[in-house]
Image (cartoon, grey):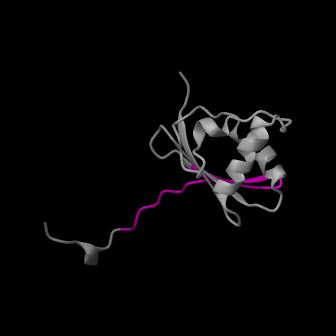
Amino acid sequence: MGYYTTHTLNAKNEDISKILRDLREKIEAGALDFHTDIFYALQMDGNYYDAVKWYNHETEMSAISRLYPEVVFELTGEGEESGDLWRDYYKNGKVQSCIAKITYDEYDESKLRGL
């Protein structure tokens, strides 16, 4: 059991593939002082690999962003429940969390169309 989310990761001012390759090398070399499940969730291009239970994504992404302090990371998630959409921005260990706001246009008679 658990709650599954699909994730995508972008970098606002850097090539995300280059960063993820570098991060993979650091993991394989045992050079990190923290554990991360990022590659269960993401492919090397930042697109989602699989829906996962990545409960520690905030802590892990905060630590990852400290490795690349000038990069603005954008982690987007879509949970298994309808409307569970969010986006987090990380820079140098700090995070800004944004929950999606779903809105509908007001009724406008001029937009009615025949079927």
- Residue 94 colored in magenta in the image: yes
At 56% from the left and 34% from the top, the residue drawn is 52
Closest to the observer, 49 or 59: 49
Spot occupied by residue 15 in the image (x, y as percentages of width and height): 67, 61
**With 62 as the anchor, is 5 left or right in this view?**
left
At 64% from the left and 55% from the top, the residue drawn is 17
**With 4 as the anchor, is 104 left or right in this view?**
left
At 58% from the left and 52% from the top, the residue drawn is 45
Quarter of the image for residue 24 reads top right
Quarter of the image for residue 114 reads bottom left
Q: How many marks?
A: 0
Spot occupied by residue 41 in the image (x, y as percentages of width and height): 59, 39
Closest to the observer, 99 or 19: 19
**With 8 as the anchor, is 32 left or right in this view?**
right
> Is residue 45 among the parts visible in the rendering?
yes
**With 54 as the anchor, is 107 left or right in this view?**
left
> Is residue 93 among the parts visible in the rendering?
no
Spot occupied by residue 75 in the image (x, y as percentages of width and height): 64, 51
Closest to the observer, 75 or 67: 67
The magenta region covers 86-106
